[in-house]
Image: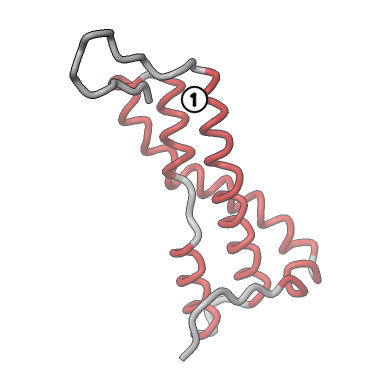
Amino acid sequence: MATGLRFDLDALLADASSLVMVPIFVAALLAARGLPAAVYRRAIGGRRTMVAGLFQATSLPFIVTATTIGVELGLMDAAESAALITAGLFSVLLFPLAGVVLLRADGPPAEKPEGDDAAPVMAM
């Protein structure tokens, strides 16, 4: 039994259709995992809802596990697996970065009032 990531870059680059799948899978991650953040919109506002959606849409461990099982069962080929894993890598690298940029554009966290011993309030 082996654990870890098996990433077949050659299979991904061998066929242009595999490369085309990557942005489609990235968009699917945003839709399936990020759109549910819309539930928070009333409570936290539009920009912070987008940030929550970006953070929720990051995914790699599940994708690696699912594609490994899919390839071993013959339900997907190495190129499809590599395209999904690439989309997961992009989600882990780009979505949090975009979320932090959006948070910074929203301004610094609220500061603790002087003389108040309560815990600091952080804006999300």
Tell me the crowding category of disc 1: few under 14, some 14 to 19, or many 20 or more residues within 10 angstroms, Cα based: some
For the point 36% across and 15% down, the residue is: 110
Is 113 above or below relative to 58? Answer: above
On the image, the x and y values in percent for residue 60 come to 50, 60
On the image, the x and y values in percent for residue 27 come to 57, 45
Q: Name the side, left or right, on which 54 lies relative to 84.
A: left
The amino acid type found where label 1 is placed reads: Leu
Q: Name the side, left or right, on which 97 lies relative to 46.
A: right
Is 99 above or below relative to 21? Answer: above
Q: Name the side, left or right, on which 40 lies relative to 82.
A: left
Q: Name the side, left or right, on which 50 lies relative to 110.
A: right
Is 45 above or below relative to 97? Answer: above
Q: Nearer the viewer, residue 57 or 124?
A: 124
Q: Nearer the viewer, residue 115 or 73?
A: 115
On the image, the x and y values in percent for residue 107 come to 49, 15
**Circle 1 residue:** 103
Looking at the image, the residue that sits furthest to the top is 114
Looking at the image, the residue that sits furthest to the left is 117
For the point 52% across and 32% down, the residue is: 100
For the point 64% across and 73% down, the residue is: 7
Looking at the image, the residue that sits furthest to the bottom is 1
Quadrant in the picture for the C terminus: top left
On the image, the x and y values in percent for residue 48 come to 42, 25
- Secondary structure under tag 1 reads helix
Q: Nearer the viewer, residue 18 or 64?
A: 64
For the point 65% across and 63% down, the residue is: 83
